[in-house]
Amino acid sequence: MFVVVDTEDLIQRVVVLVDLIWREHYPAVISEQQVEYMLAKFQGPESIQEQIREGFEYYLVCRGGGAGC
């Protein structure tokens, strides 16, 4: 099931996932400082809210069901 990210709660879920993914995979490619910068600049809650206002779409992919995963 695809869930449109359109609430603060869902945005926060995305932020948590992004943080885990970036910290697990990108330090092998870029410095820890660059990871921190990218997370703060592009994937923090305010940045994601702004991107959504600009027309970007975020989705969570869920299995099982239930509202908001």
Image: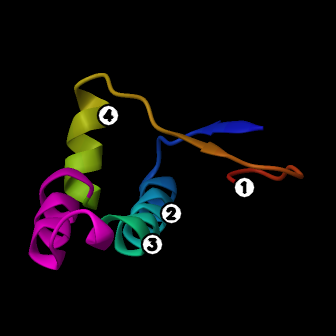
Location of residue 45 (image quadrant): bottom left
Query: What is the CA distance from the residue labelled 1 to the residue labelled 2?
Result: 10 Å
Query: Which numbered disc, 1 or 2, marks the residue that appears first in the sequence?
Result: 2
In this picture, which residue range is highlighted in magenta?
27-43
The image quarter containing residue 54 is: top left
Q: Main secondary structure of the magenta part?
A: helix
> Quick check: marks 1 and 2 in contact, CB under 8 Å?
yes
Tell me: 66 left or right of 36.
Answer: right
Q: Could you classify mark 4 by the number of other residues whose Cα lies within 10 Å: few (under 14), some (14-19), or many (20 or more)?
A: some
Compare marks 4 and 1 and give the one earlier in the sequence. Answer: 4
Q: Secondary structure at mark 1?
A: loop
Q: Amino acid at mark 4?
A: Ile
Q: Which residue is mark 4?
A: 52
- In this rendering, would 21 be left or right of 38? right
Q: Are marks 4 and 1 in contact (CB under 8 Å)?
A: no
Q: Residue furthest top?
A: 55
